[in-house]
Amino acid sequence: MRVITYKDRGYQKFVGSLDRRAEPSRELEEVVAGIVGEVRRRGDRALVDFTRKFDKTRLSVGSLFVSEKEFTEAEAAVAPATKRAIRSSRRNIHAFAKESLRKDWKRKNAEGAVVGERFTPFDRVGIYVPGGKAPLVSTALMTGAFAQAAKVPEIIAATPVGPAGKVNSDLLYALRQAGATEVLKVGGAQAIAALAMGTKSVRRVDKIFGPGNAFVVEAKRQMVGAVSIDLLPGPSEVLVVSDSSGDPVCIAADLLAQAEHGGDSVVGFVTNSSRLLKQVEKEVARQLKRLSRAEYIGDSLRKAGFAVLVRSIDHAIKICNEFAPEHLSLVVKDERRRLGEIRTAGAIYLGNISAIAVGDFLAGPSHTLPTGGAGKSFSGLRADQFQRRTSIVKMDKASVKKSLPVVQEFAQMEGLDAHGESVRLRVER
């Protein structure tokens, strides 16, 4: 990891670069626009061609979706311990989702009209599950199970497949457990385009959820308007903010765990303790040697890993709020006060013992969180994002009459006399 301290000449410039907003490159924008255009024009044939080009998989239009036979075979192939782990995660997700689902409400306003809101699930949503070097079973649960808890009737998942044209059995089992009613064997920007616009085989969805690589995130951005989206979650991030109370073993372990997500992962550590910084450096090197994906993790750390020594925890908190990390591990003595000062993190883990990996797999909140600085504008995925929100107004004679003077005043201000008349006529009748 790159190490920089407040005494270094390039310190201010580096810290300034941590205040970021993710913006697509012109080249990426054009490539994704081309893919979207092909799907718009050629539909299923474009999906088949892009799958062959990018995933080296030959699918036919008739085999774009997982069959019921494949679901059955996958369930038989999954180990009992894996099934128990998936069900345990889903149980916590459902319990967490239940607390955050919005409830219908109503009350009377000052004029006596009954106002309120009702919340209904979307009819059909799409969830994207990235492919790559490992099946992201947890992502299937951290998206689909929230839709399931919100009682969305149709959940279509999209995930890339390997050369054999099969979805990993553990992932397929998790998708079915998370309520997936269909699984599309297509990944990338082309999958997002198909979910958003529809093809002959793929019925369009109301909203798209889930993380992905730069092409997937850009496709989601370009499809806003054609469809609703959750947020723009890209490659994984972690920032550890710690004073001298931090445990170097635990801090190093969290940094390595998040670096394991891949070369685009961002891994950061900010502390006011030079002693802890040196200890964490040594611990990262020591633990890395034992890991099966050491070379892969090492590449991630060299590419986008950093450690910063600051003068004070006040400055560390300022850096955190500017960086807006996806995951924040906050390890400080004055935990309650410092927690109140954090404004932009996607998810916060408190103390040495709160392992981020438990949140990734089991704790209950979704691990689909804003990245690239988007935490300044977006929250992480929540169950209520799977609900439509509709306002309701019901008036009686008295409330309409009481409302008339104010409505007429606004109608006069804005030159909208028909608005005023629509209320006056009701009062007269």
Image: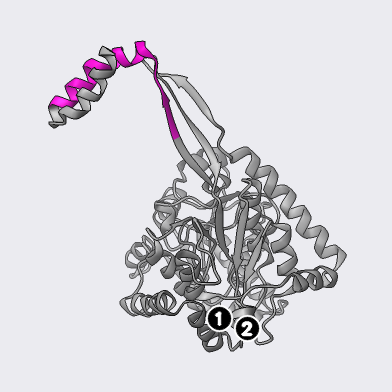
Q: Residues within 10 Å of mark 2 (few under 14, many from 20)?
A: few
x and y, in percent, of residue 142 in the image: 63, 57
**Nearest the camera: 37 or 266?**
37
Residue 400 % position (x, y): 32, 16
Visible residue check, residue 338: no
Residue 397 among those drawn in magenta: yes
Q: Could you tell me the amino acid type at mark 1? A: Asp
Residue 299 numbered tag: 1
**Residue beneath label 2, please?**
295
* Residue 211 drawn above or below residue 153: below
Amino acid at pointer 2: Glu
Please tell me whether mark 2 sits on a helix, a strand or a loop: helix
Task: Give the magenta range.
Answer: 391-412
Between residue 235 and residue 344, name the one nearer to us. Answer: 235
> Residue at horizontal 40%, vertical 61%?
226
Q: Nearer the viewer, residue 409 or 306?
A: 409
Helix, strand or loop for disc 1: helix
Q: Is residue 98 left or right of residue 325?
A: right
Tell me, yes or no, if residue 381 can be seen here: yes
User: Could you tell me which residue is drawn at 42 percent across and 57 percent down?
Assistant: 374
In x, y percent, where is residue 17?
35, 65
In the image as oriented, which residue stretches furthest toward the right?
80
Label 1 – label 2 distance at C-alpha = 6 Å
Q: How is the image coloured?
A: one colour
Q: Quadrant of the C terminus?
A: top left
Where 164 sits versus 322, above or below? below
Contact between marks 1 and 2 (CB within 8 A): the answer is: yes
* Relative image position of residue 275 (x, y in whole percent): 56, 61
